[in-house]
Amino acid sequence: MDLKALHKVYFTGKDYLMIIIGTLMYGFSFNGFILNNEIVTGGLSGICALIYFATSIPVSFSYFTFNVILLLIAYKILGIKFLIKTIFGVICLSLSLTLFEWLFQGNPILADEPFMSIIIGAGICGAGLGLIFTANGSTGGTDIIAAIVNKHKPISIGRALLFCDFIIISCSYILFHDVEKIVFGFVEMVISNYVLDMVINSNRQSVQFLIFSRKHEEIVEAIIKDLDRGCTILDGIGGYSKEQIKVVVLLAKKSESITIFRLVKQIDSQAFISQSNVRGVYGEGFDVLKT
């Protein structure tokens, strides 16, 4: 097995491990801090929580059922590569929810401390989802909708989930007739989405790469093929060695940074890379130029 194949296996295995860890974090915090305090969150898990409080149908069961339907709808939009990791994420999270439902048996970790439970649970849930998205995975549900929006528009995943979460949480009033629980739900939504965005760095900031490599042709080909991005090749001369070298200039979204580093390392582990933050990147694939 060559070096490129080893890198691919390593990064793929790392991604799936991150998805497992993220789903375990979410299942633990959702059951231990949020659901068992009768708080309805956003997303598909919030819808399933409403169903649970109304009918006693386990969240894990309704969550898995809804996701099967959503995955069938998303197949043509997100592609098979995203779908495979999403199926894996859905299965892992369904098993995680089932496990912690059985372990906690409806008992909250912090009894009679709903506000503190929401803060802790929301932070862990957001971090878990962030790990999953960082690994290019998904737990299904409204995450699929958010991923579709994020793929075509320069909007963070947390903001894409915001509107759906607002409606779902507000519906909890129909069951509990308790404004306090709605407030707790909104607190969870804000903290979870904030932590999610912090973990995956999915803001509108872009980055610029300067890649110095003698294998620039292979790197450029991989950038165009794998990332579907254009780049520019500049002529450079070493100040000390006086040798000519090609410099690849690449502008990309910050969330693509890890993928770019992986790509370059697989081709040329000796490449010299400079990354810097840039603002105001306009054009195809970035923000729309407005006058």
Image (cartoon, rainbow, N blue to C red):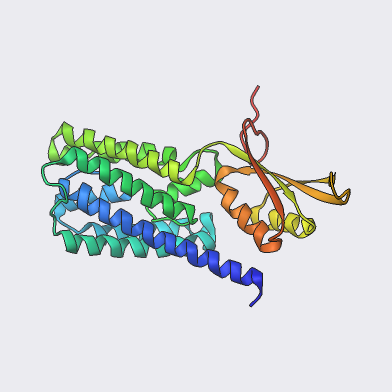
x, y percentage for residue 69?
Answer: 37, 59
In the rendered image, the quadrant that contains the N terminus is bottom right
Q: Is residue 2 left or right of residue 156?
A: right
Residue found at x 29% / y 65%: 95
Q: Residue at x 84, y 51 (%)?
A: 245
Taking the spot 76% from the left edge, 60% from the top edge, the residue there is 218
Q: Quadrant of the C terminus?
A: top right
In the rendered image, the residue lying farthest to the left is 112
Question: Would you identify the image quadrant in which residue 9 lies?
Answer: bottom right
Q: Is residue 43 visible?
A: no
Q: Nearer the viewer, residue 240 or 105?
A: 240
**Image x and y of residue 78, in percent:** 52, 55
Position of residue 174 in the picture relative to residue 238 (left or right): left
Return the x and y of residue 174 as percentages of the image width and height.
Answer: 17, 38
Q: Nearer the viewer, residue 30 or 147?
A: 30
Residue shown at 25%/38% (left/top)? 185
Q: Which residue in the rendered view is the most extreme toward the top?
A: 291
Residue lying farthest to the front in this orientation: 240
Q: Position of residue 45 (x, y in %)?
A: 29, 51
Relative horizontal placement of residue 186, taking residue 209 as reference (left or right)? left
Q: Residue furthest bottom?
A: 1
Can residue 216 be seen? yes
Q: How many marks do you count on the picture? A: 0
Instruction: Pick the residue in front: 62 or 270.
Output: 270
Please tell me whether residue 212 is drawn above or below residue 203 in the rendered image: below
